[in-house]
Image (spheres, grey):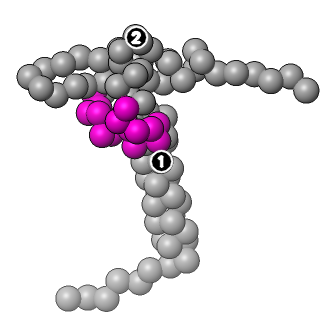
Amino acid sequence: MGATIITTEDLREFKMELLDDIKQLLQDQNGQANKKWLKSNEVRALLGISPGTLQNLRINGTLPYTKVGGVLYYEYHEIMQVLEKNKIHNRL
């Protein structure tokens, strides 16, 4: 097998492609969740809330959900809408 010479330009090009791929992955994860539907434990982790608080959000109608069998599911975009709707802008 013959030797292949790698130039500085080859390394620079590889670095740029790798950075572009990493940026794309980060945008996909930060822009929107990879999953459309989240289970209760995922919602609690996302919002940093207890099971009781999540139950209260369901009961008072703040957070819409779907129940299939015994499992509760929440739509990611609806969670984000609730956060945006309840955003408080303080003026100094």
The magenta stretch spans residue 49: yes
Relative to 6, does residue 27 appear above or below in the rendering?
Answer: above
The residue that label 1 is drawn on is: 26
Dot 1 alpha-carbon crowd within 10 angstroms: few under 14, some 14 to 19, many 20 or more: few
Instruction: Using the numbered discs, state the Cα–Cα distance from disc 2 to disc 1 in whole angstroms.
Output: 32 Å
Of 37 and 71, nearer the camera is 71
Q: Secondary structure at mark 2?
A: loop
Q: Earlier in the sequence, mark 2 or mark 1?
A: 1
Q: Give the residue pinned by disc 2.
A: 61
List x then y, in percent, for residue 5.
Answer: 41, 84
Relative to 36, is 85 on the left or the right? right
Q: Which residues are magenta?
A: 37-52
Residue 86 pos. (x, y %): 60, 18
Q: Main secondary structure of the magenta part?
A: helix
| Residue 46 in view (yes/no) | no
Total labels: the figure holds 2
Residue lying at 58% horizontally and 15% vertically, measured from the top left:
85
Name the image quarter holding the C terminus.
top right
Residue 76 sits above or below residue 78 on the image: below
- Magenta residue check for 48: yes
Quarter of the N terminus within the rendering: bottom left
The residue depicted at 44 percent of the width and 52 percent of the height is 21
Residue ID at (70%, 21%):
88
The residue at the point 40 percent across, 43 percent down is 45
Q: Secondary structure at mark 1?
A: helix
Q: Is residue 81 left or right of residue 90?
A: left
Q: Is residue 1 visible?
A: yes
Label 2 sits on what residue type? Answer: Gly
Can you say whether 75 is above or below 24 in the image? above
